[in-house]
Image: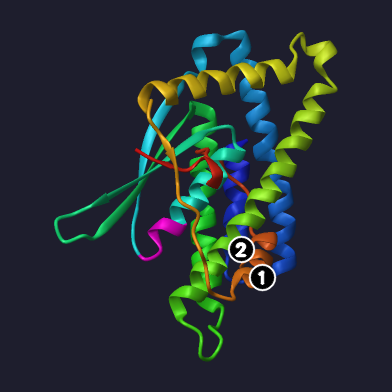
Amino acid sequence: MLEKVRKLLAKAEDPAASPQEAETYTLKAAQLIADHGIDAALLAADDPGSDRVADRVVDLEAPYAHDKAQLLSAVAHRLRCRAVLRTRRDLDGRASHSVHLFGHTSDLDRADLLFTSLLLQSTTRLARTPVPRGEHKAAFRRSWLAGFRMSISARLERAEQEAEARAASRDATSGHSTGLVLADRSAAVDETLQQAYPHLRNARPRELSGSGMRDGYAAGVNADLGGTRLRGAPRALAHD
């Protein structure tokens, strides 16, 4: 299943792909990713030790490391993971960003695959988007990335909800309640996160001044959603 997703993502990442073609690949990949996540959860319910809660740390590199961290967190959140944004400063005051992810292994893998592709897609599309005359380049690009992230988050939410609804319609024959299985998995992830970070605080909301949000949102509509490895929403971002 993930190999099929990778192939769809590769087609969407192709610079020669039109926005319409990328949208077609995106819809199919998003459906496959969501269905794969549900299938993995139900299979693990029959074999509890097969898909344990795990964690991994992802370091984000400049430029726009903080914006990349927010994209990763949004993807992770929609794929039933949790994310903690960690910011460190060196002796010269320079900040470095990383995201500590928590989730079942299958969900972390889904999020990782998708984020890697979206990072490439957003970088390519952003490089092709002209900055309006007189506007600060960094401010425009940060707002563009925010729009891209919000669009991706909304699309993933819809795909996951539709996959859950399809699975729930089969509950009578599967012997499981999809809703209860997913709730139990989320509770296990939350418990692991709480044990690792018992004193989290909410991240301070960011203020963006650039005008690129609309263009970024439109780019997110056409982006291919084909992978999954992580989970964590912007609202859930926290500093340790």
Please report the residue visible at 73 percent of the width from the left and 19 percent of the height from the top. 178
Is residue 64 on the magenta stretch?
yes
Residue 183 locus on image (x, y percent) = 65, 20
Name the colour scheme.
Answer: rainbow
Q: Where 8 falls versus 233 (above or below)?
A: below
**Gap in angstroms between the C-alphas marked 1 and 2:** 6 Å
Magenta segment, which residues? 63-67
Residue 76 locus on image (x, y percent) = 53, 40
Residue 57, visible in the rendered structure: yes
Would residue 22 appear left or right of 60 to someone viewing this image? right
Q: Are marks 1 and 2 in contact (CB under 8 Å)?
A: yes
Q: Which residue is mark 1?
A: 214
Q: Which residue is mark 2?
A: 147
In the displayed orientation, state which residue is furthest to the left: 91
Q: For the residue carrying disc 2, how many other residues have a C-alpha within 10 Å: few (<14), some (14-19), or many (20+)?
A: many
Label 1 sits on what residue type? Arg
Name which of mark 1 and mark 2 comes first in the sequence: 2
Residue 224, visible in the rendered structure: no
Label 2 sits on what residue type? Gly
SS class, disc 2: helix
Quadrant that contains the N terminus: top right
Would residue 19 appear left or right of 193 to someone viewing this image? right
SS class, disc 1: helix
Residue 68 locus on image (x, y percent) = 45, 56
Please report the residue visible at 73 percent of the width from the left and 47 percent of the height from the top. 28
